[in-house]
Every structure is written in structure tokens, then in C-alpha cells.
Image (tube, rainbow, N blue to C red):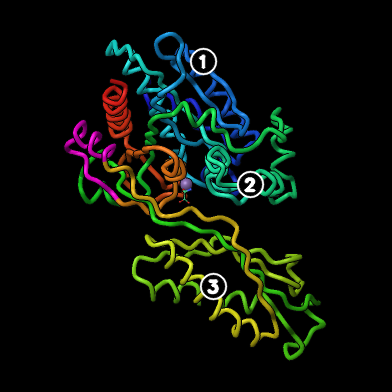
């Protein structure tokens, strides 16, 4: 097998998660480090100059005339995953970018401008809790000290993970030199909804991304013994947390277009025969309008406080990460539409590094049909023919942008 399907087949067993099912490829974990090496090897095989920048982003360059790296057209995506995720969220964009380079070579396209593929670390925030960490460090949207101090579930900091991966944490931060090289960024990604199924098309162009925030809500009560503590003597944060999770769902239902999810809940200490002393709930709240996303969280807090109080518990809320709503550059979208006239335009509910870079340069997205419409799950899928169609569409777009 060649093309996208062949490339993805070559990494299919990297990071399989036997406990959860699906794939768990956390940033700078052995699985993702293996994928990073895979990418660098595949790019080198295509005579691309590879480098790892100060923020841990991987770059593969086809230099322009005279070896120039300026005014570059850049494509790429991420390799890290959510816990127990699918195999296409991220890697499909990277494999499609490598295949698009092959297609441009086969067409004899000899661009005068540089072409690059970039791989962003920690797009999911699955290990350190900051979504789009790599791209946000690149543009200076995330302070290095905050990022480096973030810890994973084992208490390992990003600084320690970077050091273990052979990178220098002291160099992390806004990188205007790298940003100045990029004139346009286009990311291909698996669609994470049903848009293309319902429209019966293989590839779409991105219109917008809704705003996406992560908050940590901590419920504090009284830790105690599960057997020796009478029901009348308890201040159980797990009971309060359960009521709050339902309130999160009810609040979101009251705001049209809102999404609110509790996918992660963590009792401390977490013993089977222990009433927890605290429970952490992570809120993933999204809305097309940033101010409304904030309003939703305020409403959740207003409901949560009395629910906690009725169990003799208290709550505290910390905003962990926020990516604003994005409308992709209209002029660039028009150029893509001219190249791909049959491609529908989709508003998407998932966050992407392209949404972060959109703050600093014209960016666009392409989406490849997912026949299940399910993502962040092993059920995420892409048909072989659609995978190759997506790479061909990306090659068409890159050829146009490189003119
Ligand atoms: O969560 C998201 O929207 C993306 O998959 N990181
Ligand atoms: Mn994802
Ligand atoms: Mn993704």
C-alpha cells in the first residue's frame, strides 16, 4: 500500500491502548516519540530538511529558490491523541501532507516558494491539559512559565518531559522568526462529525471553529471511612459532583449551539472504601460566541454552588485553557473553493492548531469524510478512497498556493 493508507498502516500499532481500547499517544510519551521519529524519517526520505524547533514542533522543509525559507506555504497537523482515541485525529493530516508532497513531485511541480510540513506537539492537551499547547507557545499565546509548570497525571512537568525528549525547556516561547517564514497554513483533518456523510462528499473546506474552553471545578468535602461514617455524618464531594455533572448538561441545553462535557472526573484519594476529600471535575465548554461560553460557565457555577452547599461541600473553579472562536480567512477560503468547487464548507465544533495560527496568518482547513461521524473514539474512521481523495485535494490546494 502506498499513499495515506500505506503511511497510516505503518504506524497503526503505535500507541494501541489495551485497557481503554483505541489509541493513547500522549505528547512526548514513548508512543508519540515513536511517531515523531516516524515523521522525521518519512520526511527525510522525501529529501526534506527536518528540524525540531524551540517549542518541540517538528518541521520538514522543501526550500524555495536559492534555499529560501521565507514566504512559505505550510501544511501539517498533530500526532498526539486523546486517551483511547481514534487513529486518524491528527495523523491523517500528517500522512496526507507527506502524500501531497509525493503527488506534487509526481506532477513535476517545482515550486519557487518553500513548502513545509509541521507537526504540533500536545494539540489535544491530553497529557498536560493545555489544548494546542505547541501552536499557542509558537504564537506567544501561552506564557512559557505556565506551560512548563503544567503537570501530567504522574506529576511530571512539561519541562521534565521536554528534557527527557532531549529538548531545552529554557528555549520555549514565542518564535517570531519561525512565524515570519510562514505566509499561509492549511491543515487537513479527519472530520469529527457527520457533515460530509449527510452531504455525501469526500472532502470539505473549513469555515469556522467554535470557541473551546477547559475549566477545572474542584468540590471539597470531608474525606472519611466508607463504613464507619454514618450517612447523616457525611460531607461527600462525590455526591455533590454527581449533581453538578447533571447541572452542566442542563445548563448547556439552555443555550442554543452550546456544548458542555464532563469527560474526566477525579476523586482524591480515589479508594473504593474511602469517602473522597475532594473531587475534581473538568468542564469542556464550547460555543460559537466566546462571551456566551463564559456565560455558560458562570451559569454552571451559579447552579453548582448550592448543590455543593447542600452536601456540606465547597467549590472552586480554575480556567485551564481557552481557544477563541475562529472564522477562517475569507480570501484564502475563496482560493480553496476555486480549486475544490465541489467541496462543501463546514463550521466545525472541534479545535485545531489551524485555529490558533489564524490569529497570526491566513489559515485554512480541509476535512476528510469520517463514515462513522464519531471521533475521540476507536470508532473514528476514514475510508481508503476518501483518505487518498483528501491528500489529492490537499495537493491541489498546495499547488495553487505555491504558484
Ligand atoms: O478537542 C478538540 O476539539 C480537538 O480534538 N483537540
Ligand atoms: Mn482531537
Ligand atoms: Mn485533532
Nearer to the camera, 349 or 338: 338
- Ligand 1 lies under 8 Å from the Cβ of mark 2: no
x 46%, y 19%: residue: 69
Tell me the SS state at disc 1.
Answer: strand
Q: Kindly tell me whether residue 24 is visible in this rendering.
A: no
Tell me the SS state at disc 3.
Answer: helix
Measuring from the top left, give residue 399's x and y in whole percent. 29, 22
Q: Is residue 169 left or right of residue 246?
A: right
Q: Which label lies toward us, 3 or 1?
A: 1
Q: Is residue 294 left or right of residue 319?
A: left
Measuring from the top left, give residue 82's x and y in whole percent. 54, 47
Q: Earlier in the sequence, mark 2 or mark 1?
A: 1
Is residue 52 on the magenta stretch? no
Per the image, the residue denoted by label 1 is 49
Mark 1 Cα shell of 10 Å, populated few (<14), some (14-19), many (≥20) = some
Label 2 close to label 3 by CB (< 8 Å): no
Q: Kindly tell me whether residue 194 is visible in this rendering.
A: yes
Question: What segment carries the magenta color?
Answer: 331-346
Mark 2 Cα shell of 10 Å, populated few (<14), some (14-19), many (≥20) = few
Tell me the SS state at disc 2.
Answer: loop
Label 3 close to label 1 by CB (< 8 Å): no
Q: Which quarter of the picture shows residue 115?
A: top left
- Between the residue at mark 2 and the residue at mark 1, the CA separation in whole angstroms equals 29 Å
Say which quadrant the N terminus sits in.
Answer: top left
Per the image, the residue denoted by label 3 is 245
Q: Earlier in the sequence, mark 3 or mark 1?
A: 1
x 38%, y 39%: residue: 189
| Rendered image: mark on residue 143 | 2
Mark 3 Cα shell of 10 Å, populated few (<14), some (14-19), many (≥20) = many
Amino acid at each position: 500500500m502506498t499513499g495515506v493508507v500505506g503511511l497510516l498502516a505503518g504506524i497503526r500499532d503505535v500507541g494501541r491502548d489495551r485497557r481503554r481500547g483505541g489509541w493513547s499517544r500522549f505528547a512526548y510519551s514513548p508512543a508519540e516519540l515513536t511517531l515523531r521519529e516516524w515523521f522525521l524519517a518519512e520526511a527525510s526520505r522525501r529529501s526534506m530538511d527536518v528540524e525540531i524547533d524551540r517549542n518541540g514542533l517538528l518541521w520538514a522543509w522543501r526550500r524555495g529558490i536559492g534555499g529560501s525559507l521565507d514566504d512559505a506555504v505550510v501544511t501539517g497537523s498533530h500526532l498526539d491523541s486523546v486517551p483511547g482515541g481514534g487513529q486518524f485525529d491528527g495523523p491523517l493530516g500528517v500522512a496526507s501532507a507527506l502524500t501531497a508532497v509525493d503527488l506534487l513531485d509526481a506532477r513535476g511541480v517545482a515550486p519557487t516558494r518553500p513548502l513545509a510540513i509541521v507537526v504540533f506537539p500536545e494539540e489535544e492537551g491530553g497529557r498536560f491539559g493545555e489544548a494546542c499547547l505547541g501552536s499557542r507557545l509558537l504564537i506567544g499565546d501561552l506564557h512559557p512559565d505556565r506551560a512548563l509548570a503544567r503537570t501530567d497525571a504522574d506529576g511530571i512537568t512539561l519541562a521534565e518531559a521536554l528534557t527527557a525528549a532531549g529538548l531545552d525547556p529554557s528555549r520555549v516561547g514565542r518564535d517570531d522568526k519561525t512565524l515570519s517564514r510562514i505566509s499561509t497554513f492549511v491543515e487537513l483533518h479527519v472530520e469529527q462529525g457527520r457533515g460530509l456523510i449527510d452531504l455525501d462528499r469526500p472532502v470539505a473546506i473549513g469555515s469556522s471553529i467554535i470557541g473551546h474552553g477547559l475549566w477545572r471545578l474542584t468540590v471539597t468535602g470531608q474525606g472519611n471511612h466508607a463504613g464507619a461514617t454514618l450517612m447523616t455524618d457525611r460531607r461527600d464531594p462525590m455526591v455533590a459532583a454527581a449533581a453538578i455533572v447533571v447541572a452542566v448538561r442542563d445548563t448547556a441545553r439552555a443555550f442554543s449551539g452550546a456544548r458542555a462535557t464532563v469527560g474526566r472526573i477525579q476523586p482524591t484519594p480515589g479508594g473504593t472504601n474511602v469517602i473522597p476529600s475532594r473531587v475534581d471535575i473538568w468542564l469542556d465548554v464550547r460555543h460559537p460566541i466566546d462571551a456566551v461560553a463564559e456565560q455558560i460557565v458562570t451559569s454552571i457555577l451559579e447552579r453548582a454552588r448550592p448543590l455543593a452547599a447542600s452536601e456540606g461541600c465547597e467549590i472552586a473553579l480554575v480556567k485551564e485553557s481557552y481557544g477563541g472562536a475562529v472564522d477562517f480567512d475569507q480570501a484564502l477560503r475563496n482560493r480553496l473553493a476555486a480549486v475544490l468547487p465541489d467541496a462543501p464548507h463546514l463550521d466545525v465544533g472541534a479545535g485545531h492548531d489551524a485555529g490558533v495560527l489564524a490569529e497570526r496568518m491566513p489559515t485554512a482547513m480541509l476535512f476528510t469524510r469520517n463514515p462513522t461521524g464519531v471521533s475521540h473514539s476507536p470508532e473514528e474512521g476514514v475510508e481508503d478512497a476518501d483518505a487518498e481523495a483528501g491528500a489529492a485535494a490537499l495537493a491541489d490546494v498546495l499547488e495553487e498556493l505555491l504558484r
